[in-house]
């Protein structure tokens, strides 16, 4: 199967191409479109499973290195993509020398990309299946699946690429597909606004990624992952920095991290993700929960050697991740749109992943990425099931009591809720607890216990706003109008006469499968402290660098800290205490939140009144969007655009128009000069010639005696003139 890995991205691409070109002209039925779209993703999943199995059982044990598609031969497995010219190296031991510019298009399969392709194809397939029921009857059915499969192609290119430039193609490609899918309902102004916002904000981060990529090539003379990481381990190329220092490694890591903050919605570039909920709910599940937004975490882990060379940047990543986890969770408290609550939850969970990477626990970050894909995709699809049942109602204040009407959606949603809250034996418990413990015990960067406190606080906040979502949506009395008069009426309720019922099997089966994943997927990372072997972390060990020497901290007067890749320390009773504290916090908050929303609404309202300023700030998302709008969009971007317009209108256009005016003016002057000077002289010469020719022609009589008379007369006149002058 390894030689077929190029088909993993190719199949969704071919189906996207076919549906995009022929989906409308051939008037394909929804059933045919669904078979083509879902079938191509399913085949990619099958090939992915076979390729990963072969890689793990035969290729890696034999070769001990990543598999590259170029080993299978030429096109379409791989080919030289960029070739020509030479590039000059500016840093490192080979500074001043030139290297040939050669970049290949080839796919790489190693332990990290294996995890990613399995997550993308497995979760992506079930989201595609769910979409069949969700998008049924939509006028752009073929267009939706064409764009979804194009996204699958781009995402698979991103995670399977063998070099930074190829990754950047997938990176920009998922951004383009995100723009298309968020703005799928293009006739809706808000969707058009949200798609543009997502596209532009991501471009800000991508600029940092580009600069870092240029620096990487200038330093190493290559963009191939295997070559760059191998050279980066050498201090001659990329010196190891101590904490508090800022050198070349820090600058490169900063550029990469800026790109990651845009794609993975971290402070300060997180503002696009909540608005991205304007797209269809399966889009939210696929792009903004399970795959695209995790690209930043994947990229940081892929370049972990570069980041580990800069403990300063590691601290920055951990701090931004922890702050984002708490900041986004605080906004999830007050949102009433069910999808936006899940959006802020996604931002918060991504913060946990970056927190893990920042403290050197890259495997734990990818483990949380893996478990998060199951339970967050499950909850987004569960929200989609509710939205369809309530005729596209998304306000949780107009829901309630849905557990009795939608038992499958409710029970599967509970699995996602328990997983994200970190309840034992559900997947989120294993990955989140691993991150918190690694943060508390880290010796890679200072302040680990303060960062743990932020993560611990974020875990409690997550338990509250997710329990609030479940209570408002599924528990209590209905706050919508049910066909036949059942339930309580509400002035803003669902459409009268609309019957609330469970979603069809094409939508509930994906919920059941993902619920099973949210329940059992964490067992592969069962921690050693609980008697397990943490096979997930051991699987990723070959792609995570373990530096042999200690990394000193400048100016701290402390003993050298342990190496970045080493374990945080021996498991002790302290880990059990922290684990129990996390469980107790989550369980206590879940219980308290349920009581407030179901039995003590008066107490809840009293609390809201007491903290009204904070409540309003959270409900208005701390006015960050308004701040960005006023300072950056209107204060900077629009002013620069107006300045550019003036320069263009008065400078560029003025120069062009002035040049045109001068051309017309000088053409008129030239025409006047030609008409009244040149033509006058030419005509005057012609007239004089004609005049003299007439006079001279009179002398040409043809009689010899006349000529003799003229000659004689001339001689006489000349003689007379001579005599007069000599007198």
Image (tube, rainbow, N blue to C red):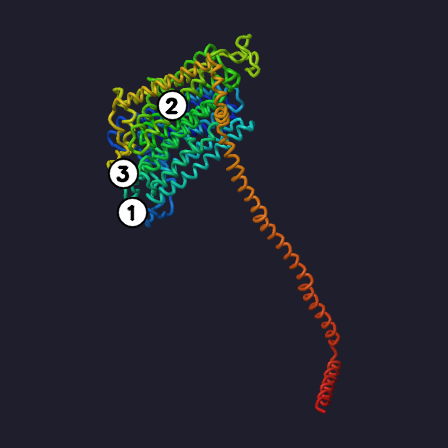
Residue 194 place in picture, x, y as percent: 51, 30
Look at the picture and state if 307 lies above or below 384: below
Q: Secondary structure at mark 3?
A: loop
10 Å neighbourhood of mark 2: few (<14), some, or many (≥20)? many
Give the Cα separation between the discs numbered 2 and 3.
33 Å
Q: Is residue 607 visible?
A: yes
* Of marks 1 and 2, the one in the foreground: 2
Tell me, yes or no, whether the two marked residues, 2 and 3, touch with CB atoms within 8 Å: no
- For numbered disc 2, what is the local secondary structure? helix
Judge from the rendering whether residue 93 lies leftward or rightward of residue 121; answer left or right.
left
Q: Quadrant of residue 646?
A: top right
What is the distance, in whole Å, between disc 3 and disc 1 at their CAs?
32 Å
Q: Label 1: how many residues lie within 10 Å, few (<14), some (14-19) or many (20+)?
A: few
Q: Is residue 2 visible?
A: no
Which residue was labeled with disc 2?
459
User: In whole angstroms, how far apart are the C-alphas of marks 1 and 2?
Assistant: 46 Å
Q: Which residue is mark 1?
A: 93
Give the mark nearer the N terminus: 2 vs 3.
2
Classify the position of the C terminus by image quarter. bottom right
Residue identified by numbered label 3:
557
Q: Position of residue 343 (x, y in %)?
A: 45, 25
Residue drawn at point x = 70 percent, y = 90 percent: 726
Q: Is residue 556 left or right of residue 33?
A: left
Pointer 3 or 1: first along the chain = 1
In this view, the mark in front (3 or 1):
3
Q: Residues within 10 Å of mark 3 (few under 14, many from 20)?
A: few
């Amino acid at each position: 199967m390894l030689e077929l890995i190029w088909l993993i991205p190719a199949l969704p691409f071919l189906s996207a191409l076919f549906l995009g070109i022929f989906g409308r002209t051939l008037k394909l039925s929804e059933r045919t479109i669904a078979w083509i779209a879902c079938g191509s993703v399913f085949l990619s999943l099958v090939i992915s499973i076979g390729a990963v199995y072969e890689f793990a059982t035969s290729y890696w044990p034999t070769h001990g290195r990543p598999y590259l598609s170029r080993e299978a031969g030429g096109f379409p497995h791989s080919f030289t993509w960029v070739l020509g010219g030479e590039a000059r190296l500016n840093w490192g031991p080979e500074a001043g020398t030139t290297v040939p510019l050669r970049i290949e298009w080839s796919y790489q399969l190693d332990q990290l990309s294996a995890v990613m392709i399995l997550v993308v194809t497995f979760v992506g397939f079930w989201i595609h299946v769910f979409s069949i029921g969700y998008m049924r009857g939509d006028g752009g059915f073929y267009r939706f699946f064409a764009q979804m499969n194009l996204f699958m192609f781009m995402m698979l290119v991103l995670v399977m690429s063998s070099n930074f430039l190829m990754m950047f193609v997938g990176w920009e490609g998922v951004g383009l597909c995100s723009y298309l899918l968020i703005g799928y309902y293009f006739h809706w102004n808000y969707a058009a606004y949200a798609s543009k916002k997502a596209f532009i904000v991501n471009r800000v981060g991508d600029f940092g990624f580009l600069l870092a990529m240029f620096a990487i090539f200038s330093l190493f003379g290559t963009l191939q992952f295997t070559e760059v990481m191998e050279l980066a381990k050498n201090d001659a190329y990329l010196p190891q920095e101590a904490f508090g220092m800022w050198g070349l490694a820090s600058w490169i890591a900063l550029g990469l991290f800026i790109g990651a903050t845009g794609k993975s919605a971290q402070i300060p570039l997180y503002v696009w993700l909540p608005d991205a909920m304007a797209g269809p709910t399966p889009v939210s599940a696929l792009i903004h929960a399970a795959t695209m937004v995790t690209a930043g975490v994947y990229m940081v882990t892929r370049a972990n050697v570069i980041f580990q060379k800069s403990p300063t940047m590691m601290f920055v990543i951990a701090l931004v991740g922890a702050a984002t986890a708490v900041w986004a969770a605080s906004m999830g408290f007050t949102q009433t749109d069910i999808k936006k609550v899940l959006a802020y939850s996604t931002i918060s969970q991504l913060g946990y992943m970056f927190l893990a990477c920042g403290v050197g626990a890259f495997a734990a970050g990818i483990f949380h990425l893996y478990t998060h894909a199951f339970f967050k995709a499950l909850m987004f699809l569960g929200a989609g099931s509710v939205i369809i049942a309530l005729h596209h109602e998304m306000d949780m204040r107009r829901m309630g009591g849905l557990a009795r009407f939608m038992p499958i959606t409710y029970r599967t949603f509970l699995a996602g809720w328990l997983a994200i809250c970190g309840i034992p034996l559900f997947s989120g418990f294993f990955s989140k607890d691993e991150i918190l413990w690694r943060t508390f015990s880290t010796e890679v960067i200072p302040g680990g216990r303060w960062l743990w406190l932020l993560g611990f606080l974020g875990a409690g906040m997550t338990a509250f706003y997710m329990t609030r979502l479940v209570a408002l949506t599924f528990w209590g009395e209905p706050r919508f109008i049910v066909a036949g008069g059942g339930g309580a009426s509400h002035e803003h309720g669902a459409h009268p006469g609309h019957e609330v019922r469970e979603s069809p099997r094409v939508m509930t089966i994906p919920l059941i499968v993902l619920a099973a994943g949210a329940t059992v997927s964490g067992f592969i990372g069962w921690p050693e402290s609980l008697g397990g072997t943490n096979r997930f972390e051991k699987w990723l060990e070959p792609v995570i660098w373990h530096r042999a020497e200690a990394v000193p901290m400048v100016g701290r007067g402390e003993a050298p800290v342990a190496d970045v890749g080493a374990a945080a320390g021996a498991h002790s009773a302290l880990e059990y205490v922290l684990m129990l504290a996390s469980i107790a916090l989550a369980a206590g908050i879940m219980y308290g939140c349920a009581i407030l929303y179901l039995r003590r609404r008066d107490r809840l309202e009293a609390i809201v009144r007491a903290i009204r300023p904070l409540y309003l700030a959270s409900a208005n998302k701390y006015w960050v969007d308004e701040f960005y709008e006023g300072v950056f969009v209107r204060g900077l971007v629009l002013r620069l655009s107006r300045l550019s317009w003036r320069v263009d209108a008065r400078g560029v256009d003025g120069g062009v128009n002035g040049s045109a005016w001068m051309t017309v003016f000088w053409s008129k002057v030239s025409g006047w000069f030609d008409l009244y000077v040149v033509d006058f002289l030419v005509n005057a010469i012609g007239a004089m010639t004609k005049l003299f020719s007439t006079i001279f022609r009179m002398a040409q009589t043809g009689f010899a005696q006349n000529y003799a008379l003229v000659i004689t007369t001339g001689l006489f006149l000349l003689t007379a003139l001579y005599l007069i002058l000599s007198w």
